[in-house]
Amino acid sequence: MDAIDRKILAALQDDGRLTVTELASRVGLSVSPCHRRLRELERVRTIRGYRAVVDAAALGLTFQALVFVTMRQEDRNTLLGFEAAVACIPEVVQAQRLFGDPDYLLRVVTADLAAYQRLEDDHLAALPGIQRLTSTLVMKDVVDSRPLSAPA
């Protein structure tokens, strides 16, 4: 990864709708080499996809919780079953397995507290292998979806 690749990534994280011509102009390349570099970044999955960043509040999703999950047991089948089940819950917008305790961190987005309570009672608490769920409510997003930059 060189400086031009980093410029391409920065430009696309700023505006993923750039045409190859606009991108080439921003990074100081002609269209053909820029297009080759872009395709290579996609091929090796440095760029994993393109999407719109949607405002959750505009969709009526104004409630966020961070859910810390402690597992009762941590054998392979239990963890894989838990992870597969979590992946099927649309309100879970981010899930991370952690070192230490707790075992997982889930970021959950719902319309309101009542919707979150129903989700926890009906779905989260029923996930396989769970010993304990601990929720923390998000007051506000301070940093959200910050662009990534590769070390120089």
Image (cartoon, rainbow, N blue to C red):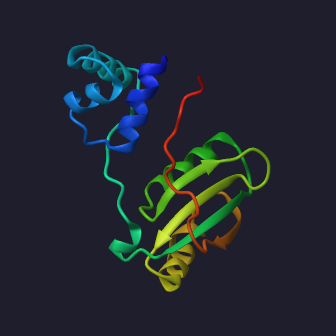
Point out residue 25 in the picture as x, y percentages from the top left corner.
Answer: 27, 27
| Residue drawn 70% across the image and 43% down it | 75
| Residue drawn 38% across the image and 23% down it | 41
Point out residue 71 in the picture as x, y percentages from the top left corner.
Answer: 71, 56
> In the image, 32: left or right of 39?
left
Work out whether 10 lies above or below 25: below
Work out whether 139 lies above or below 39: below
Looking at the rendering, which quadrant does residue 29 occupy?
A: top left
User: Does residue 46 appear in the picture of this structure?
Assistant: no
The number of callouts visible is 0
Q: Nearer the viewer, residue 111 or 28?
A: 28
Work out whether 31 lies above or below 72: above
User: Does residue 87 appear in the picture of this structure?
Assistant: yes
Point out residue 89 in the picture as x, y percentages from the top left corner.
Answer: 45, 61
Work out whether 114 lies above or below 55: below
Q: Nearer the viewer, residue 103 or 35?
A: 35
Point out residue 96 in the picture as x, y percentages from the top left corner.
Answer: 60, 49
| Residue drawn 59% across the image and 22% down it | 152
